[in-house]
Structure formats: structure tokens, C-alpha cells
Image (tube, grey):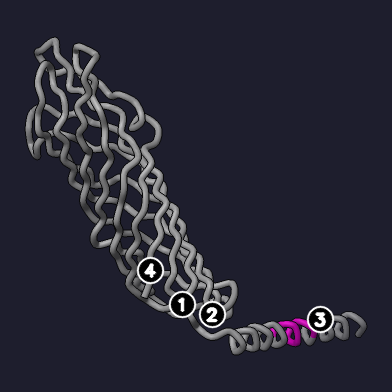
């Protein structure tokens, strides 16, 4: 008998706890509107080269004594234009929502300088990149209209550089399809601050040449902008 009474008390307590918990979540949700909505963004800012992108990367030219030289990159600039697309309803009392971060236009460049063989002259040139980035995003809305976006994206880009090869200079096109980005946005209403770390390599081969040169081009980007 005592065992039956104990079991009944435990069952009633479990039902009460479950009901109370659901009411609490509904009550919390009722006091916090769903502010997390899909929208457009644009952001710009400086690009800082990282790791080997800050050093001279020299790759030997096949069947030759010369080298294809990729000099250290310096601080450049970037612009991202994209859209946050949310795929389902908000959860956790309207404080969180998941979706896709789609950057449909990403542009950035980094300048560089090359010392001549005499050591008394320097030639300046640029690494140019353009492409797109896509990946999952989780947005957290802790209070008011403050948003924190955490995302991971795959990058697909093309690149161009006019750089020293052997004893001369050469225009070279490159590409990468699976470079990576981890990023965090902090948004309040229309103002946006973004920190991005991009890592990977680009293959310069003029879109199909037998000579392929893989160059690391990791960067850290600190961007500001607007979201609508």
C-alpha cells in the first residue's frame, strides 16, 4: 500500500512539474516577441592577412630554376553583401532561431610589395578576390533587439594577381571552392559589427593550366555595416 501511495505521489509530482515547466516557457515566450527575422545586410572593413599569407611563399617552377613568388600580403579591405534566411520558427522562448547565412557577393583585396633584384626598388601589386559564401547560422536574441549571429560558411572565390615569376612578371588567375569561414555578428536594430576568420588556400592555375600553385590566404576581417 505504501509503495502504491509513493508511486502515486511521484506520478502527480512529475505531471505537476511538466505542466509548470510548459506554462513557464509559454509565459516567458509571451513576454518576449519574436524579433529574429530574415533580412539583408551589407558590411565593410579592413582585412588582416594571417599565417603564411603574411610571409613570402615561393614555389619552384616545373622544369626551371626559377620560382613563382607570392610576396607577403598587407592589410586590405573587404565588402560583404548578403541575406540571413531563417528556415523555421524561433525557439527557446523566441530567443533563438536557426537558418542560412548567404553572402551572395564577397569582395576583398590585399596589397603587397616586391623588392627588385637590385634591392633599391619596390613594385606594388594587389591580391584581388571575389565570390560567395554560404552556411548555417544560429541567431541568439538575449534582450530587446540585440542579436548575436554565429555562423560557419564555405567560400567559393576566384582570385587575380599580377606578381613576379622567374625574372619577369605574370598575370595569374586562381580559384578556391572549399575555403572556410567562422564568424560572429553583433547586431542592434540596423547597426552591425562582424568578426570573421577565413582560412584555406587558393590554387593559381589560370583555370586549367598544367602549372598549379597553392597559396595560403587566411585572413581576419573586422567589418561594420547595416542590416535591414
Residue named by callout 2: 94
Tell me the residue at 10%/25% (across/down). 169
Give percent across and percent down for residue 228. Answer: 36, 75
Q: Residues within 10 Å of mark 1 (few under 14, many from 20)?
A: many
What's the distance in space between the residues labelled 4 and 1, CA to CA? 15 Å
Q: Nearer the viewer, residue 96 or 218?
A: 218
Q: Is residue 191 left or right of residue 39?
A: right
Q: Which circle marks residue 10 in the picture?
A: 3
Give percent across and percent down for residue 192. Answer: 43, 65
Q: Which corner quadrant of the image does residue 161 belong to?
A: top left
Q: Which residues are magenta?
A: 13-18
Residue named by callout 1: 36
In the image, residue 189 sits, relative to residue 78, either above or below, namely: below
Q: Residues within 10 Å of mark 3 (few under 14, many from 20)?
A: few
Whether the residues at callouts 3 and 1 have beta carbons within 8 Å, the answer is no
Looking at the image, tell me whether mark 2 or mark 1 is earlier in sequence order. Answer: 1
Looking at the image, tell me whether mark 3 or mark 2 is earlier in sequence order. Answer: 3
- Please tell me whether residue 134 belongs to the stretch shown in magenta: no
Amino acid at each position: 500500500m505504501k509503495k502504491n501511495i509513493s508511486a502515486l505521489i511521484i506520478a502527480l509530482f512529475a505531471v505537476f512539474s511538466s505542466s509548470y515547466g510548459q506554462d513557464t516557457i509559454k509565459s516567458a515566450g509571451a513576454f518576449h516577441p519574436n524579433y529574429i527575422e530574415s533580412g539583408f545586410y551589407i558590411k565593410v572593413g579592413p582585412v588582416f592577412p594571417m599565417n603564411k599569407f603574411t610571409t613570402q611563399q615561393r614555389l619552384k617552377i616545373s622544369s626551371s630554376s626559377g620560382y613563382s613568388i607570392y610576396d607577403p600580403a598587407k592589410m586590405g579591405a573587404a565588402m560583404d553583401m548578403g541575406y540571413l534566411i531563417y528556415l523555421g520558427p524561433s525557439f527557446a522562448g523566441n530567443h533563438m532561431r536557426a537558418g542560412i547565412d548567404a553572402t551572395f557577393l564577397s569582395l576583398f583585396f590585399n596589397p603587397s610589395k616586391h623588392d627588385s633584384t637590385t634591392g633599391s626598388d619596390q613594385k606594388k601589386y594587389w591580391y584581388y578576390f571575389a565570390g560567395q559564401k554560404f552556411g548555417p547560422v544560429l541567431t541568439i536574441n538575449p534582450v530587446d533587439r540585440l542579436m548575436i549571429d554565429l555562423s560557419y560558411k564555405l567560400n567559393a572565390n576566384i582570385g587575380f594577381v599580377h606578381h613576379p615569376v622567374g625574372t619577369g612578371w605574370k598575370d595569374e588567375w586562381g580559384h578556391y571552392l572549399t575555403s572556410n569561414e567562422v564568424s560572429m555578428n553583433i547586431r542592434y536594430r540596423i547597426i552591425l559589427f562582424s568578426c570573421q576568420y577565413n582560412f584555406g588556400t587558393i590554387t593559381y592555375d589560370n583555370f586549367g593550366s598544367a602549372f598549379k600553385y597553392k597559396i595560403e590566404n587566411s585572413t581576419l576581417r573586422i567589418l561594420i555595416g547595416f542590416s535591414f
